[in-house]
Structure formats: structure tokens, C-alpha cells
Image: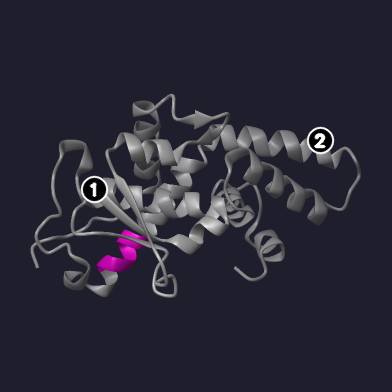
Amino acid sequence: MSYFYKPKTDAELEQIAAAIRAIFPKRRFGLAVDIEGILEDFGLELLPRRGFRRYAEGYLARDPRLIVVDESIFAYLPRARFTLAEEVCHLVLEYKLWTGGTLPHGASGHELSEKQHVFIEKDASSLASVLLLPAAEFIASFNSKLRELEATGAPQLNVLRETLKHVADVFQVSPAAAGFRSRKLRLISAEMLKELLPHK
């Protein structure tokens, strides 16, 4: 195996996400990142298929410009947007998309070690989160809503739950995605996240 994927640091993922957003500054809906528009601007084609979601929600075809997704993901658009972002992030991280490269020798799924596969999947998911939920904007939106709800005197768990729903709506992601990003940015504790998302 000649291909080796080096895991990215949190700082590197933030830099990559910022670079993507800088290339496509008009691809926003308010604070939400227009991942569908970015996919289109990259010249990527989306190919919906039926019935493979139990294995994966999406994957890259041999042609690195083609993303195959299970059509059922579009029943819940916030999750679909995250899936599309993950696949775009796979291309960015693995295919050297910026320079027009192709899949490196030894990088096909069946050639990767389990450890390499875990690294790649983790980074693609993390980069998707960072791309769709820019830190400064997310923190500002989270804290603004949090202060507003705390002023009502509502129980803390309810305040945090409604805050997550708010930022999820603003950035057009699922409450779960908003929750994990909140934890990563240390806006909530690990214990509170478990209470807010008990089945995750």
C-alpha cells in the first residue's frame, strides 16, 4: 500500500473549511452554508439511488466528480445537507481536488487499513461540521439565543435544548449536529450533551 492518510488537527480542519468558504463567499443562505451550491460549483454530480442506506448514506464513485447518495436522506434535509458536506469533504481531504488530482494509488476503500479508514471518516465528518457551522458565527448565534432564553428563567436543560434547536434552524443542520459542534466549541459540557441527545 503506497497511500497514507495523515489525520488532520482541529486547527487544520478549521483552516480548510475557511478556505472552502472563502472560495465560495456567495454560497450562503443567511448564516447557513449553501453546500448544494458549493457541490455544483465544484462541478460535482449528485446521483440519488434507492435502498443502500443501511450500509451508508452516501459514497464516492470511481469518478471523483460523482457523489452517490441514498435518495431517502432527502426526507430530512438537514441530515441530507450534512451527508453532502461529508462527501465533498472526502473529496477535499483525499482527492487533492484543489489541484485537479485523482485518487492516489492505494487509497481505494478496499485497500485501506481499518485504522486509515477510521481516520478518514472521522476527519470528513469533522470537516463537514466545521464547514457548515463556522466557529465565530455559531458561537455568536448560540450565545445570543442562550442569553435571551436564560432571561426567561426557564430550566437550564430546556434553555439549552431550545438554543440547539435555534442554531440548528439558523445553520440548517440537525439539532444533533448543532449539539456536537456546541460540545466541540465547549459551549456545553459532555454530560449536558448526553442529556440533550440521549440516543446519540
Residue 195: name its quadrant: bottom right
The secondary structure type at the circle numbered 1 is loop
Q: Is residue 20 above or below residue 102?
A: above
Q: Is residue 38 visible?
A: yes
Residue 114: name its quadrant: bottom left
Q: Which residue is mark 2?
A: 148
Q: Position of residue 138 (x, y in %)?
A: 59, 37
In the picture, the quarter occupied by the C terminus is bottom right
Q: Is residue 29 above or below residue 116?
A: above
Q: Position of residue 167 (x, y in %)?
A: 65, 42
Q: Looking at the magenta stretch, what is its main secondary structure?
A: helix
Instruction: Identify the magenta region.
Output: 116-121
Q: Which residue is mark 1?
A: 65
- Amino acid at circle 2: Glu
- Amino acid at circle 1: Arg
Q: Residue furthest right?
A: 153
Q: Is residue 117 shown in magenta?
A: yes
Q: Nearer the viewer, mark 2 or mark 1?
A: 1
Q: Is residue 16 visible?
A: no
At x 18%, y 65%, the residue is: 108
At x 40%, y 47%, the residue is: 10
